[in-house]
Image: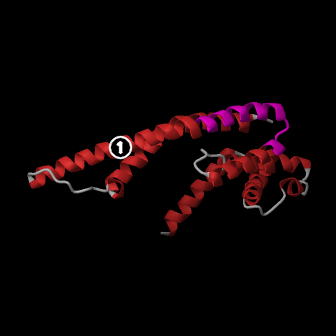
Amino acid sequence: MEDIIKSALEIAQEKLQKLGDATPEERLGWKYEPKGEELGARFMRDDCNLLTELGHYQENERKYVVKGAVEVLLRNITLPKNDAVKKNNRKAMDALKLLKNDKTAVENVYSKVRYLFGHYEEQGEQQRKQAYESLKTDMTDKLQQALQQQTGSVSNTKIDVERQPQFQQEWRKLQNQLDSAYLTHLNEYKHALAAIA
């Protein structure tokens, strides 16, 4: 057993030697990006003032802290499925705008994000309602047919298809399909925001 551990350790040491020494920039990134991620998470929980906390870091450290915070803030921007998510989105977007230098570029991307969110809430909501009703009708018809085949007669039994696990599973799958186009665009916009200085 010791031989295995020893050889694994030797392999790891060889790999580290092949990588060479880390640059001072890489070391700063390794140290301060996680601090930025923590800062972003604390900000989203209302535990801190973002700008005050950033003031505690030196200039060469701050860019890594900002990078880590930006990653967390971007992860907190999601499709506006309810009021809590909308509030979270606004908070993350406001913070991102504070952290980015090119406010005009940020605002240009935000206009696309707001348009996407508006479309999701209006047309997307209609699509989801139509898809839900269509799925409900299809599943009800299928269950009625299956019941008729089992009993041999038409039943007036009312089936609450919405409580059926298969219906819930199909509905989740359908929601994911409906949301996928919106998520694709949102992810593009998040990548654009991440690239802005």
Pointer 1 residue = 135
**Camera sees residue 22:** no
Q: Residue at x 29, y 42 (%)?
A: 138
Image spot of residue 94 (x, y percent): 78, 46
Provide residue 35's location: percent of width, then percent of height: 77, 57
Q: Which residues are magenta?
A: 97-119
Q: Secondary structure at mark 1?
A: helix
Is 121 rendered above or below residue 157?
A: above
Q: Residue at x 38, y 53 (%)?
A: 168
Q: Is residue 52 magenta?
A: no
x, y (%) of residue 154?
Answer: 14, 50
Quarter assignment of residue 96: top right
Residue located at (23% from left, 46% from top): 142
* Residue 110 shown in magenta: yes
Q: Position of residue 65 (x, y in %)?
A: 80, 51
* Residue at 83% across, 54% down: 50
Q: Does residue 141 appear in this view?
A: yes
